[in-house]
Image: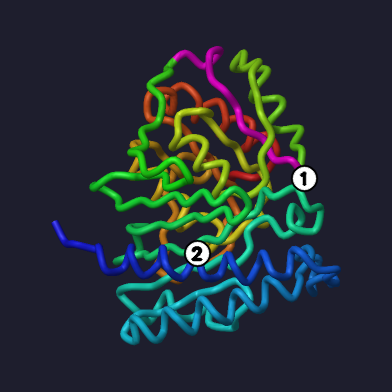
Amino acid sequence: MASFDTELDTARRIARQAGDILLKIYATDFSVQDKAGGMGPVTEADERANAFIVGELRKAFPGDGVVAEESDNSGDGKRFERCWYVDPLDGTQEFVNRNGEFAIHVGLAVAGQATVGVVYRPVGNKLYTGLVGQGAFLEEEGGRRALRVSDVADPSALRLVVSRSHRSKLTDAVAKRLGITRERESGSVGLKCGLLAEATADVYIHTSGKSYRWDNCAPEAVLRAAGGILTDLGGTPYSYDGSELQNHRGLLACNAAAFPQVQPVVAQFAREAGILR
C-alpha cells in the first residue's frame, strides 16, 4: 500500500497555519460580502487562508493539481492524477455568527478517489486526519486517538447530526420515517463527518445540491478511514476526477452498519423531492 505520510504531515501543518490566519481575523471586526450567484457569504478570512493553502500546496507538491473554493482552478481535477481539494473556511456562516463551528478542509484525491484528508477546527484546536485504508485519528489538547465509526445498525437508535444554519424538511421527513429521535446540531460538513468518525453521531444528510467537492473530499477521506461511508443521496460515491465539481445529488454520510437501511429511504425521499432522477 502506498505511503502518504509526507502528504498527510504537510496537510496537517498547512491546515494548522491556515487556522492561525482565520483566528487572527476572527478576533477582529471583519467585513462580510455576498458571493456572486447567491453562493453565500465570503470574508477576508476565506480569501487569505485560500491563498496561503494553495501557495503552500503548490510549493510542496508542484506536480499535483489544486482545486480550491476561492480560486479559479477548477480544471485541475481533470488534468492531474493527484489533485488537492481545498475549502479554506468551511462554515463561513458559522464564522460570521462567531459560534466556532467552522473548519479548514485539505483533501487529496488520487485517481478520482478521496485518499488523504485533514479537517481542522481552529476554535478548540481539533484536527481530524484520515488515510483511507490506514486509519483516522483525532488530535486535540489531550493527545491523539484513533477513530472508528459506531456499529449502531438499528435506524431508530441512530444519532442524526443536522446543520445549524440550514434546516431541511427532507431530512426531518427521513428521520421521522426511520424513527430517529436523537439529533445534534453542528456547522461545517467536515465537523459533522468528524462527529461520525468519533462515533458521537451516526448519520448526516445534506439535501441541497449547492455543496461542492472541496466541501467533502477531506471529510470523506476522514470518514472512510474511520470505517464510514459518504455518497450522494442515491448511494453512489462521488468522483474527484474533475468531471463535475458541484454535488447536485446531495450528500449522505453514515456508519457502515446502518447504511443499507438508511440509504434506500433517503433515496426514495430524494426522488420524490426531485433531487434524484
Q: Mark 2 vs mark 1: which is more N-terminal?
A: 2
Vertical placement of residue 52 versus 277, above or below: below
The magenta region covers 154-164
**Residue visible at 57% across and 31% down in the picture:** 266
Q: Secondary structure at mark 1?
A: loop
Could you say which quadrant of the image residue 245 lies in? bottom right
Q: Is residue 155 visible?
A: yes
For residue 202, side relative to residue 6 (left or right): right
In the figure, residue 171 lies in which quadrant?
top right
Residue at 41% x, 63% y: name it: 12
Asked whether, in this view, residue 133 is left or right of residue 144, the answer is left
State which mark lies toward you, 2 or 1: 2
Expressed as whole percent of the image width and height from the top left, the position of residue 90 reads 63, 58
Label 1 sits on what residue type? Ser
Residue on which disc 2 sits: 16
* Amino acid bearing label 2: Arg
Residue 161 falls within the magenta-colored stretch: yes
CA–CA distance between discs 2 and 1? 25 Å
Q: Badge 1 is on which residue?
A: 165
Residue 186 at x, y percent in the picture: 66, 40
Q: Nearer the viewer, residue 31 or 117?
A: 31
Residue 32 appears in view: no
